[in-house]
Amino acid sequence: MTSTYEKIATNTLGSAAASVTFSTISGSYTDLVLVANWGVSVNGDGTIIRFNSDTGNNYSDTELYGTGSSAASQRRSNASFIDITRAIAGDGTNIYTNAIINIQNYSNTTTYKTALLRSNLATGTYAGVAALVGLWRSTSAITSITILPASNNLLSGSTFTLYGIKAE
Amino acid sequence: MATTYTLISSVTVGSGGAANIDFTGIPSTYTDLLVKYSIRDSNNSISQNINLTFNNAGGTAYSERLLYGSGSAAQSFSSSSAANINFQYATGVAATASTFSNGEIYIPNYAGSTAKSVSVDSVVENNASGTAMGLNAGLSSNTAAITSVKLASPSGTFQQYSTAYLYGISNA
Protein backbone atom coordinates (compact mmCIF):
# COMPACT_ATOMS: atom_id res chain seq x y z
CA MET A 1 0.00 0.00 0.00
CA THR A 2 1.27 3.43 -0.83
CA SER A 3 1.70 5.60 2.23
CA THR A 4 0.30 9.03 1.44
CA TYR A 5 1.29 10.73 4.68
CA GLU A 6 4.75 9.88 5.97
CA LYS A 7 6.92 11.14 8.76
CA ILE A 8 10.13 12.54 7.35
CA ALA A 9 11.81 13.48 10.63
CA THR A 10 11.02 14.41 14.20
CA ASN A 11 12.90 16.33 16.86
CA THR A 12 12.08 16.39 20.56
CA LEU A 13 14.43 18.72 22.36
CA GLY A 14 16.19 17.14 25.32
CA SER A 15 17.61 20.51 26.27
CA ALA A 16 17.08 24.11 25.26
CA ALA A 17 18.26 24.85 21.73
CA ALA A 18 18.77 27.93 19.61
CA SER A 19 17.10 26.37 16.60
CA VAL A 20 15.81 23.20 14.97
CA THR A 21 16.61 22.37 11.36
CA PHE A 22 15.16 19.72 9.11
CA SER A 23 17.76 19.27 6.40
CA THR A 24 18.24 17.22 3.23
CA ILE A 25 14.49 17.05 2.71
CA SER A 26 13.78 14.68 -0.14
CA GLY A 27 11.99 16.03 -3.19
CA SER A 28 9.94 12.88 -3.50
CA TYR A 29 6.81 14.22 -1.80
CA THR A 30 4.18 16.60 -3.10
CA ASP A 31 3.56 18.70 0.01
CA LEU A 32 5.06 19.14 3.46
CA VAL A 33 3.36 19.50 6.86
CA LEU A 34 5.29 20.68 9.90
CA VAL A 35 3.64 20.20 13.30
CA ALA A 36 5.23 22.06 16.21
CA ASN A 37 4.47 22.25 19.94
CA TRP A 38 6.95 24.44 21.73
CA GLY A 39 7.90 27.15 24.16
CA VAL A 40 10.56 29.84 24.12
CA SER A 41 12.92 30.85 26.87
CA VAL A 42 11.86 34.49 27.08
CA ASN A 43 8.24 35.57 27.31
CA GLY A 44 7.09 37.43 24.23
CA ASP A 45 9.79 36.17 21.93
CA GLY A 46 8.60 35.39 18.41
CA THR A 47 9.42 32.24 16.46
CA ILE A 48 10.40 32.30 12.81
CA ILE A 49 11.12 29.91 9.98
CA ARG A 50 13.48 30.06 7.03
CA PHE A 51 13.91 27.82 4.03
CA ASN A 52 17.24 26.57 2.70
CA SER A 53 19.07 28.81 5.22
CA ASP A 54 18.13 31.85 3.15
CA THR A 55 18.57 34.94 5.34
CA GLY A 56 17.90 37.40 2.52
CA ASN A 57 14.88 39.67 2.41
CA ASN A 58 12.94 37.18 0.31
CA TYR A 59 9.96 36.50 2.54
CA SER A 60 6.58 38.10 3.09
CA ASP A 61 3.49 37.20 5.07
CA THR A 62 -0.10 38.21 5.69
CA GLU A 63 -1.81 37.35 8.94
CA LEU A 64 -5.36 37.24 10.29
CA TYR A 65 -5.35 37.06 14.06
CA GLY A 66 -7.34 37.39 17.24
CA THR A 67 -6.01 38.35 20.65
CA GLY A 68 -9.06 37.37 22.63
CA SER A 69 -10.44 40.90 22.57
CA SER A 70 -9.86 42.10 19.03
CA ALA A 71 -9.46 40.73 15.52
CA ALA A 72 -7.17 42.26 12.93
CA SER A 73 -4.92 41.60 9.98
CA GLN A 74 -1.38 42.69 9.23
CA ARG A 75 1.30 42.01 6.68
CA ARG A 76 5.00 42.41 6.06
CA SER A 77 7.04 42.56 2.85
CA ASN A 78 10.71 41.97 2.11
CA ALA A 79 11.41 40.26 5.41
CA SER A 80 14.26 37.88 6.14
CA PHE A 81 11.93 35.22 7.62
CA ILE A 82 8.32 34.15 8.08
CA ASP A 83 7.17 34.85 11.62
CA ILE A 84 4.93 31.96 12.60
CA THR A 85 3.86 33.61 15.84
CA ARG A 86 3.86 37.18 14.73
CA ALA A 87 0.79 38.38 16.58
CA ILE A 88 0.90 36.02 19.52
CA ALA A 89 4.62 35.77 20.35
CA GLY A 90 5.64 32.93 22.64
CA ASP A 91 5.23 31.80 26.18
CA GLY A 92 8.38 32.18 28.22
CA THR A 93 8.03 29.32 30.63
CA ASN A 94 5.81 26.62 29.20
CA ILE A 95 5.34 24.56 26.05
CA TYR A 96 2.01 26.10 25.24
CA THR A 97 2.26 27.15 21.60
CA ASN A 98 1.36 24.95 18.67
CA ALA A 99 1.48 25.49 14.94
CA ILE A 100 0.60 23.50 11.85
CA ILE A 101 2.41 24.62 8.71
CA ASN A 102 1.42 23.37 5.24
CA ILE A 103 3.84 23.89 2.38
CA GLN A 104 2.39 22.88 -0.97
CA ASN A 105 4.41 21.93 -4.05
CA TYR A 106 7.62 22.57 -2.12
CA SER A 107 9.99 20.78 -4.47
CA ASN A 108 9.21 22.38 -7.78
CA THR A 109 11.91 24.58 -9.31
CA THR A 110 9.59 26.85 -11.29
CA THR A 111 7.46 28.78 -8.81
CA TYR A 112 7.90 30.70 -5.58
CA LYS A 113 6.85 28.79 -2.45
CA THR A 114 3.75 29.54 -0.38
CA ALA A 115 3.05 28.27 3.13
CA LEU A 116 -0.27 28.19 4.97
CA LEU A 117 0.07 28.37 8.75
CA ARG A 118 -2.13 28.09 11.84
CA SER A 119 -0.64 29.05 15.19
CA ASN A 120 -2.15 29.01 18.66
CA LEU A 121 -1.35 30.21 22.14
CA ALA A 122 -4.35 30.01 24.45
CA THR A 123 -3.06 31.68 27.59
CA GLY A 124 -0.66 34.32 28.82
CA THR A 125 0.21 37.91 28.04
CA TYR A 126 0.92 37.19 24.39
CA ALA A 127 -1.89 34.73 23.75
CA GLY A 128 -3.82 34.63 20.51
CA VAL A 129 -4.88 32.62 17.53
CA ALA A 130 -3.67 33.26 14.00
CA ALA A 131 -3.86 32.12 10.41
CA LEU A 132 -1.02 33.21 8.15
CA VAL A 133 0.10 32.90 4.60
CA GLY A 134 3.84 33.11 4.02
CA LEU A 135 5.72 33.49 0.76
CA TRP A 136 9.34 32.65 -0.03
CA ARG A 137 10.37 34.29 -3.26
CA SER A 138 12.59 31.54 -4.55
CA THR A 139 12.17 28.97 -7.26
CA SER A 140 14.54 26.58 -5.52
CA ALA A 141 13.15 23.35 -4.17
CA ILE A 142 12.85 23.49 -0.38
CA THR A 143 15.46 21.13 1.03
CA SER A 144 15.72 22.47 4.57
CA ILE A 145 13.51 24.23 7.11
CA THR A 146 14.87 26.03 10.16
CA ILE A 147 12.71 27.02 13.14
CA LEU A 148 14.19 29.45 15.64
CA PRO A 149 13.12 32.00 18.23
CA ALA A 150 13.72 35.56 17.16
CA SER A 151 16.35 36.09 19.85
CA ASN A 152 16.49 33.33 22.45
CA ASN A 153 16.05 29.55 22.86
CA LEU A 154 13.46 26.88 22.26
CA LEU A 155 12.55 25.12 25.50
CA SER A 156 13.51 21.57 26.35
CA GLY A 157 10.59 19.23 25.64
CA SER A 158 9.50 21.13 22.53
CA THR A 159 8.49 18.79 19.70
CA PHE A 160 8.73 19.28 15.94
CA THR A 161 7.69 16.74 13.31
CA LEU A 162 7.93 17.09 9.54
CA TYR A 163 5.60 15.01 7.39
CA GLY A 164 5.59 14.47 3.66
CA ILE A 165 2.42 14.00 1.62
CA LYS A 166 2.50 12.06 -1.62
CA ALA A 167 -0.06 12.58 -4.35
CA GLU A 168 0.08 9.06 -5.72
CA MET B 1 6.24 1.06 6.03
CA ALA B 2 4.69 2.69 9.07
CA THR B 3 1.17 4.05 8.83
CA THR B 4 1.16 7.70 9.85
CA TYR B 5 -2.60 8.23 10.08
CA THR B 6 -4.57 5.55 11.92
CA LEU B 7 -8.28 5.58 12.65
CA ILE B 8 -8.63 4.92 16.38
CA SER B 9 -12.39 5.12 16.63
CA SER B 10 -15.45 6.64 14.99
CA VAL B 11 -18.97 7.50 16.07
CA THR B 12 -22.10 7.99 14.00
CA VAL B 13 -25.03 9.24 16.04
CA GLY B 14 -28.17 7.18 15.71
CA SER B 15 -31.83 8.13 15.53
CA GLY B 16 -32.18 8.85 19.22
CA GLY B 17 -29.47 11.50 19.26
CA ALA B 18 -26.61 11.64 21.74
CA ALA B 19 -25.72 14.09 24.47
CA ASN B 20 -22.05 13.58 23.78
CA ILE B 21 -19.45 11.77 21.74
CA ASP B 22 -16.85 10.19 23.98
CA PHE B 23 -13.62 8.58 22.81
CA THR B 24 -12.15 6.58 25.66
CA GLY B 25 -9.21 4.27 26.19
CA ILE B 26 -6.98 6.20 23.81
CA PRO B 27 -3.55 4.54 23.74
CA SER B 28 -0.42 6.62 24.13
CA THR B 29 1.26 5.03 21.12
CA TYR B 30 0.72 7.94 18.75
CA THR B 31 2.31 11.34 18.55
CA ASP B 32 -0.71 13.55 17.88
CA LEU B 33 -4.47 13.20 17.87
CA LEU B 34 -6.89 14.55 15.28
CA VAL B 35 -10.68 14.64 15.57
CA LYS B 36 -12.70 15.37 12.46
CA TYR B 37 -16.34 15.99 13.14
CA SER B 38 -19.57 16.76 11.33
CA ILE B 39 -22.28 17.69 13.84
CA ARG B 40 -25.81 19.03 14.01
CA ASP B 41 -27.20 19.92 17.43
CA SER B 42 -30.77 20.02 18.76
CA ASN B 43 -30.36 23.53 20.12
CA ASN B 44 -32.76 25.96 18.43
CA SER B 45 -30.05 28.11 16.91
CA ILE B 46 -28.09 28.25 13.67
CA SER B 47 -24.68 27.83 15.26
CA GLN B 48 -24.05 26.25 18.62
CA ASN B 49 -20.95 25.75 20.72
CA ILE B 50 -19.57 22.30 21.55
CA ASN B 51 -17.92 21.56 24.90
CA LEU B 52 -14.56 19.80 24.57
CA THR B 53 -12.92 18.11 27.56
CA PHE B 54 -10.11 15.63 28.11
CA ASN B 55 -9.96 12.77 30.60
CA ASN B 56 -13.39 13.82 31.93
CA ALA B 57 -11.66 16.66 33.74
CA GLY B 58 -13.69 19.80 34.33
CA GLY B 59 -12.73 22.29 36.99
CA THR B 60 -10.79 25.31 35.83
CA ALA B 61 -8.14 23.70 33.65
CA TYR B 62 -9.07 25.19 30.29
CA SER B 63 -8.40 28.43 28.48
CA GLU B 64 -8.85 29.54 24.89
CA ARG B 65 -8.60 32.33 22.32
CA LEU B 66 -10.99 32.52 19.41
CA LEU B 67 -10.88 34.30 16.07
CA TYR B 68 -14.42 34.36 14.79
CA GLY B 69 -16.16 35.39 11.58
CA SER B 70 -19.93 35.66 11.30
CA GLY B 71 -20.10 36.63 7.65
CA SER B 72 -20.44 40.29 8.51
CA ALA B 73 -17.75 40.91 11.14
CA ALA B 74 -14.55 39.47 12.58
CA GLN B 75 -14.19 39.32 16.33
CA SER B 76 -12.02 37.70 18.95
CA PHE B 77 -12.98 36.23 22.30
CA SER B 78 -11.25 34.49 25.16
CA SER B 79 -11.98 32.49 28.26
CA SER B 80 -9.81 31.22 31.08
CA SER B 81 -10.13 29.01 34.14
CA ALA B 82 -13.02 27.31 32.39
CA ALA B 83 -14.49 23.83 32.73
CA ASN B 84 -14.10 23.10 29.03
CA ILE B 85 -12.98 24.41 25.65
CA ASN B 86 -16.17 25.51 23.96
CA PHE B 87 -15.26 27.75 21.03
CA GLN B 88 -15.91 25.15 18.37
CA TYR B 89 -19.17 25.04 16.50
CA ALA B 90 -22.02 22.73 15.62
CA THR B 91 -24.91 23.53 13.35
CA GLY B 92 -28.16 23.98 15.30
CA VAL B 93 -31.61 22.84 14.21
CA ALA B 94 -32.65 26.40 13.27
CA ALA B 95 -30.23 26.15 10.35
CA THR B 96 -31.18 24.94 6.91
CA ALA B 97 -32.19 21.28 7.00
CA SER B 98 -29.50 18.72 6.28
CA THR B 99 -26.66 21.15 6.99
CA PHE B 100 -23.96 19.95 9.39
CA SER B 101 -20.93 21.75 10.77
CA ASN B 102 -17.38 20.69 9.98
CA GLY B 103 -14.55 20.83 12.46
CA GLU B 104 -11.01 19.66 13.05
CA ILE B 105 -9.40 19.40 16.49
CA TYR B 106 -5.64 18.83 16.44
CA ILE B 107 -3.85 17.89 19.67
CA PRO B 108 -0.07 17.65 19.30
CA ASN B 109 2.02 15.71 21.83
CA TYR B 110 -1.12 14.51 23.62
CA ALA B 111 0.70 11.79 25.54
CA GLY B 112 3.49 14.02 26.81
CA SER B 113 3.89 15.42 30.29
CA THR B 114 3.32 19.05 29.40
CA ALA B 115 0.10 21.06 29.27
CA LYS B 116 -1.98 20.20 26.21
CA SER B 117 -2.18 22.80 23.48
CA VAL B 118 -5.01 22.42 20.97
CA SER B 119 -5.79 23.84 17.52
CA VAL B 120 -9.42 23.91 16.37
CA ASP B 121 -10.91 25.02 13.05
CA SER B 122 -14.69 24.84 12.69
CA VAL B 123 -17.38 26.15 10.38
CA VAL B 124 -21.15 26.42 10.19
CA GLU B 125 -22.57 27.34 6.78
CA ASN B 126 -26.26 27.77 6.14
CA ASN B 127 -26.83 29.62 2.87
CA ALA B 128 -28.12 32.41 5.11
CA SER B 129 -27.00 34.64 7.97
CA GLY B 130 -26.19 33.35 11.42
CA THR B 131 -23.28 31.23 10.33
CA ALA B 132 -19.92 30.93 12.06
CA MET B 133 -16.31 30.31 11.24
CA GLY B 134 -13.88 29.91 14.11
CA LEU B 135 -10.17 29.43 14.57
CA ASN B 136 -9.48 28.51 18.15
CA ALA B 137 -6.41 28.12 20.35
CA GLY B 138 -7.22 25.89 23.32
CA LEU B 139 -5.21 24.77 26.30
CA SER B 140 -5.67 22.26 29.08
CA SER B 141 -3.26 22.90 31.93
CA ASN B 142 -3.49 19.25 32.98
CA THR B 143 -0.20 17.52 32.25
CA ALA B 144 -1.43 13.91 32.28
CA ALA B 145 -1.51 12.02 29.00
CA ILE B 146 -4.87 12.36 27.27
CA THR B 147 -6.72 9.05 27.36
CA SER B 148 -10.20 10.29 26.54
CA VAL B 149 -11.71 13.06 24.45
CA LYS B 150 -15.31 14.15 24.88
CA LEU B 151 -17.45 16.38 22.68
CA ALA B 152 -20.64 17.37 24.49
CA SER B 153 -23.71 19.39 23.60
CA PRO B 154 -24.08 22.18 26.19
CA SER B 155 -27.87 22.13 26.24
CA GLY B 156 -29.21 19.57 23.84
CA THR B 157 -28.21 16.52 21.89
CA PHE B 158 -26.22 15.80 18.79
CA GLN B 159 -28.57 14.85 15.99
CA GLN B 160 -28.76 11.70 13.92
CA TYR B 161 -26.06 11.39 11.25
CA SER B 162 -23.60 13.48 13.22
CA THR B 163 -20.16 11.89 12.95
CA ALA B 164 -16.78 12.14 14.63
CA TYR B 165 -13.58 10.34 13.73
CA LEU B 166 -10.55 10.11 15.99
CA TYR B 167 -7.20 9.57 14.28
CA GLY B 168 -3.83 8.88 15.78
CA ILE B 169 -0.90 10.42 13.95
CA SER B 170 2.38 8.64 14.43
CA ASN B 171 5.86 9.92 13.79
CA ALA B 172 7.36 6.48 14.32
Image: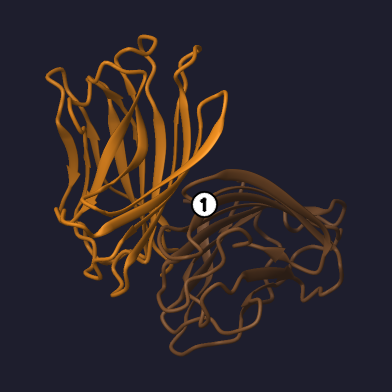
Chain colours: A brown, B orange
Q: How many discs mark residues in the rendered view?
A: 1
Instruction: Quarter of the image for the C terminus of chain B: give it.
Output: bottom left
Which residue in the protein does label 1 denote? A67
- Where does residue B148 sit, x and y in percent of width and height? 19, 54
Secondary element type, mark 1: loop
In the image, taking residue A143 as reference, residue A88 lies left or right, namely: left
Q: Please state the horizontal and vertical placement of residue A15, each as a whole percent of the image.
A: 46, 90
Tell me the residue at 87%/52% (across/down). Answer: A110
Tell me which chain the residue with mark 1 is part of: A
Note whether residue B154 is visible.
yes
Hey, which residue is sitting farthest front in the picture? A69
Residue A105 visible (yes or no): no
Query: Could you say which quadrant of the image residue A45 lies in?
Result: bottom right
Residue extending farthest to the bottom is A15
Q: Seen in the image, is A163 located left or right of residue A31? A: left
Work out whether A116 lies above or below B102.
below
Q: Is residue B29 above or below residue B79?
A: below
Residue A7: image x %, image y %? Answer: 50, 65
Give the residue drawn at x 54%, y 45%: A70
Which of B87 and B55 lies nearest the eye of the viewer? Answer: B87
Which amino acid type is shown beneath numbered disc 1? Thr
Quadrant placement of the N terminus of chain B: bottom left
Residue B32: x, y in percent?
Answer: 37, 60
The residue located at (85%, 63%) in the rendering is A58
Answer with the quarter of the image where residue A137 lies: bottom right
Identified at 60% across, 84% down, the residue is A152
